[in-house]
Image: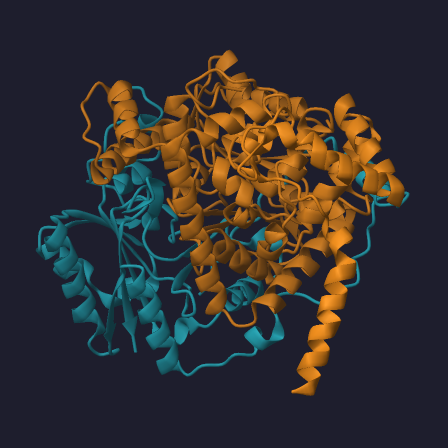
Chain colours: A cyan, B orange
């Protein structure tokens, strides 16, 4: 189900030769090395990479870590999922008075079929696709008519007015309770960034123990770097800051409320 | 550089060190805030280490990865740059700070930029980019909450991770009130809400997003950014142009290695298992993407770093991952905070890095004395940089270059002569006993003349005894021997 992103035109390089020659000469080489250096080691210590857990342990760990960061989790069965997710979205919206939400244009989310029941509750949905903002009034530019924001894509501006974003992460990491999002195309990065609240829905078999396992999957799916999605995001809890007298502030720039539904 | 306190102080790193220290020691709020914050971060780190298995094994792996990368920087930097370009980004190698500033100005001009939204970037502070932008009439807004507060106050960071620890709520409320014309109560929630709204507008309206780079991944040409607030994501997602300014050493070879340094960084900096947002950015937006910057520019800066390569003592300083764990455990930093150092980089790492990057032993080299050589920094360092050894080597360098004061050099010369000769030593200790007499009250020296006054200002000094330990040793030895005998009889 991976959509390989189209290759980008190569960029430019400036000032390389003198810069690299200097580094090589400081390191005692006549020219910059072109051969991959020998490596006796790589990555995390073995005692860590060899750890294995059952799916139940993964779920337990993810829940413990996620809730410790003030996140909420709901675990449902495959059969319950469509109704439960729709109900959960309506509940979040009601709780915070949310009337407009955005979601990834992702086949798994579409298959859950929550758009209908959510719209019935009077909530507008901006799916992350080219025509997603049709019929939606996007927000004005903060600086008024003619501002930079006013000239940006309608979809982006519409998403910025949404207060809940829904994503289907590619992986979830139990040891840190992180969501791994490989963002491109319908899986826009703004959906997990601009809203007040975030909801991630995923299956229990997408849980891995380490962030390194998510990286391995990423590299396997995109073995050639030029095909990699422009953004891989790991999201670990709500946006936070301690910059005002060490008081923990939640939701400073990104979503301050984070929810997860795990489908077992 | 803009001032750091409210009072005018000597901005020269070395010459102003004493007056800045005095200033900091007299600031009761600062001292409490720094002690509280560093304790909190330090304890967080200890707790995170505890739950993570064999911390020493992690640390050793972190050191090995960073040392390997630096020792082969020509290969990895070349690979990284090639991959950035392949992925559609533009790479600019800049030898000096002013080259990087000029490169940034060119990009800004080409894009007719009026507003730059900045994520946290120590390198941009190192090259004083904000001041240059201001001169050109381009508004640069710091979007990290702490940095934003400092920008309003026109001050510099006092901690790498929590830049505005020296500001209290009342002061922040006043800054926000002045900036907006609205009135703000000194309540964290209210202040944070205002900052969220205000800074959101900057994210939306910025022509350029500027960030640093926590780690570049050589095998893919990816830029890794970490932030807890999400401002790093905002400025690298919303504006049409994303510019990265990074030190040339800020690389890891592969994603496998990235896992290690991300774990070490989060746990060492704040005690989190992972920083809230980790963004791994590979090229500008791809076709089919509906958000993300259209242009990506990566400015790679040397600025004194390559001078450390091949240096048997100092090459490892480039291993640093900027976690600030060494600040939190340093007894000197904990008393005086970051401004005293007079440099963008403070604490033990700042005391080593500043003279090396600036290649200035005369002024910046004085920072090597703002340390107690206790080695706590080394023990806390997640990549095992021997900072305490480097501090000694820097002091040595300063002495060898004859950059210490003449009286100090004479004093140490005499010290060497006297302590190297038993007769002179005996004579000196005897005469010191008689010379101190006019100063002694109740067995203590309570107010000495300079340079002794530096000590007696804050504590008394016990008088030298008439008989030194060395003189007593013969009698003590006999006493000890006779006690042992008695003990043996029982």
- Determine the image quadrant of residue A19: top right
Which x, y percent locates residue B106? 59, 20
**Position in image of residue B329 (x %, y %):** 52, 50
Q: Is residue B212 left or right of residue A190?
A: right
Name the residue furthest bottom: B490
Question: Which residue is more in the foreground, A60 or B452?
Answer: B452
Q: In this orientation, which residue lies closer to the viewer: B203 or B425?
A: B425
Above or below: residue A57 compared with residue B346 = below
State the quadrant of the C terminus of chain B.
bottom right
* Residue drawn at x 70%, y 30% as measured from the top left: B435
Residue B286 falls left or right of residue B419: left
Tell me if residue A44 comes above or below residue A250 in the rendering.
below
Q: Position of residue B430 (x, y in %)?
A: 77, 39
B450 over B64 or under it: above or below: above
Q: Is residue A160 visible?
A: yes
Residue located at (14% from left, 47% from top): A99
Is residue B65 shown left or right of residue B454?
A: right
Q: How many dots with numbers?
A: 0
Relative depth, front residue between A83 and B164: B164
* Image position of A115 with respect to B448: above or below: below
Q: Residue at x 13, y 58 (%)?
A: A90
Residue closest to the eye, A235 or B372: B372
Give the image quarter of residue B195. Answer: top left
Q: Tell me, yes or no, if residue A18 can be seen here.
A: no
Q: Is residue B14 left or right of residue A257?
A: right
Measuring from the top left, give residue B359's x and y in whole percent.
74, 29
State the image quarter where residue A169 is shown.
bottom left
């Amino acid at each position: 189900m991976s959509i390989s992103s189209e290759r980008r035109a190569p960029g430019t390089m400036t000032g390389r030769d003198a810069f690299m020659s200097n580094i090589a000469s400081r390191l005692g080489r006549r020219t910059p090395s072109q051969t991959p250096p020998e490596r006796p080691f790589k990555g995390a210590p073995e005692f860590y990479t060899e750890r294995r857990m059952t799916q139940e342990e993964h779920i337990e760990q993810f829940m413990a870590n996620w809730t410790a960061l003030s996140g909420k989790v709901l675990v449902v069965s495959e059969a319950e999922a469509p109704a439960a997710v729709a109900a959960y979205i309506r509940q979040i919206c009601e709780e915070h008075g949310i009337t407009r939400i955005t979601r990834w244009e992702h086949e798994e989310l579409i298959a859950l079929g929550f758009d209908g029941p959510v719209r019935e509750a009077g909530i507008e949905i901006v799916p992350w696709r080219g025509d997603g903002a049709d019929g939606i009034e996007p927000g004005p530019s903060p600086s008024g008519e003619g501002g930079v924001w006013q000239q940006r894509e309608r979809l982006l501006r519409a998403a910025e007015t949404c207060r809940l974003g829904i994503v289907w992460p590619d992986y979830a990491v139990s040891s840190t309770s992180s969501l791994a999002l490989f963002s491109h195309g319908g899986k826009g990065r703004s959906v997990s960034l601009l809203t007040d609240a975030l909801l991630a829905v995923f299956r229990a078999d997408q849980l891995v123990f380490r962030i390194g396992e998510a990286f391995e999957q990423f590299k396997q799916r995109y073995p050639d770097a030029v095909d990699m999605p422009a953004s891989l995001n790991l999201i670990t809890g709500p946006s936070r800051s301690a910059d005002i007298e060490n008081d923990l502030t939640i939701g400073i720039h990104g979503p301050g409320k984070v929810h997860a539904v795990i489908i077992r | 550089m803009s001032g750091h306190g409210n009072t005018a102080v000597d901005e020269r790193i070395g010459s102003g060190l004493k007056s800045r220290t005095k200033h900091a020691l007299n600031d009761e709020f600062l001292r409490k805030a720094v002690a509280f914050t560093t304790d909190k971060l330090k304890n967080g780190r200890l707790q995170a280490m505890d739950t993570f298995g064999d911390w020493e094994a992690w640390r050793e792996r972190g050191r090995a990865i960073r040392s390997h990368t630096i020792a082969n920087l020509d290969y990895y930097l070349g690979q990284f740059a090639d991959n950035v370009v392949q992925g559609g980004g533009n790479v600019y190698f800049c030898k000096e700070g002013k080259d990087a500033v000029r490169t940034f100005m060119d990009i800004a001009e080409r894009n007719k930029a009026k507003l730059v939204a900045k994520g946290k970037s120590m390198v941009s502070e190192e090259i004083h980019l904000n001041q240059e932008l201001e001169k050109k009439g381009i508004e640069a807004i710091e979007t990290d909450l702490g940095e934003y507060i400092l920008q309003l106050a026109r001050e510099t960071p006092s901690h790498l991770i929590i830049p505005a620890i020296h500001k209290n709520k009342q002061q922040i409320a006043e800054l926000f009130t002045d900036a907006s014309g609205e009135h703000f109560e000194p309540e964290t929630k209210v202040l944070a809400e205002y900052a969220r709204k205000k800074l959101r507008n900057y994210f939306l309206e910025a022509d350029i997003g500027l960030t640093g780079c926590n780690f570049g991944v050589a095998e893919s040409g990816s830029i890794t950014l970490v932030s807890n607030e999400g401002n790093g994501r905002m400025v690298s997602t919303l504006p049409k142009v994303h510019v990265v300014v990074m030190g040339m050493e800020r690389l890891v070879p592969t994603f496998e290695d990235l896992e290690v340094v991300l774990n070490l960084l989060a746990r060492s900096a704040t005690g989190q298992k992972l920083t809230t947002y980790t963004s791994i950015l590979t090229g500008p937006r791809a076709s089919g993407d509906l958000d993300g910057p259209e242009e990506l520019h990566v400015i790679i800066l040397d600025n004194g770093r390559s001078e450390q390569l091949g240096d048997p003592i100092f090459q490892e300083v480039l291993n640093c991952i900027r976690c600030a764990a060494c600040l939190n455990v340093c007894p000197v930093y904990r008393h005086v905070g970051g401004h005293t150092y007079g440099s963008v980089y403070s604490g033990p790492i700042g005391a080593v890095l500043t003279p090396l990057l600036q290649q200035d032993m005369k002024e910046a080299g004085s920072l090597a004395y703002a340390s107690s050589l206790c080695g706590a920094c080394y023990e806390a360092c997640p990549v095992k940089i021997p900072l305490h050894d480097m501090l000694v080597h820097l002091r040595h360098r300063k002495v060898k270059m004859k950059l210490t004061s003449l009286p100090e050099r004479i004093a140490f010369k005499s010290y060497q002569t006297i302590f190297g000769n038993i007769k002179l030593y005996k004579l000196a200790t005897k005469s010191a006993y008689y010379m101190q007499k006019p100063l002694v009250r109740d067995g203590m020296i309570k107010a000495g003349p300079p340079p002794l006054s530096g000590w007696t200002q804050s504590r008394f000094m016990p008088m030298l005894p008439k008989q030194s330990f060395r003189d007593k040793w013969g009698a003590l030895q006999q006493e000890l021997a006779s006690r042992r005998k008695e003990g043996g009889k029982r």
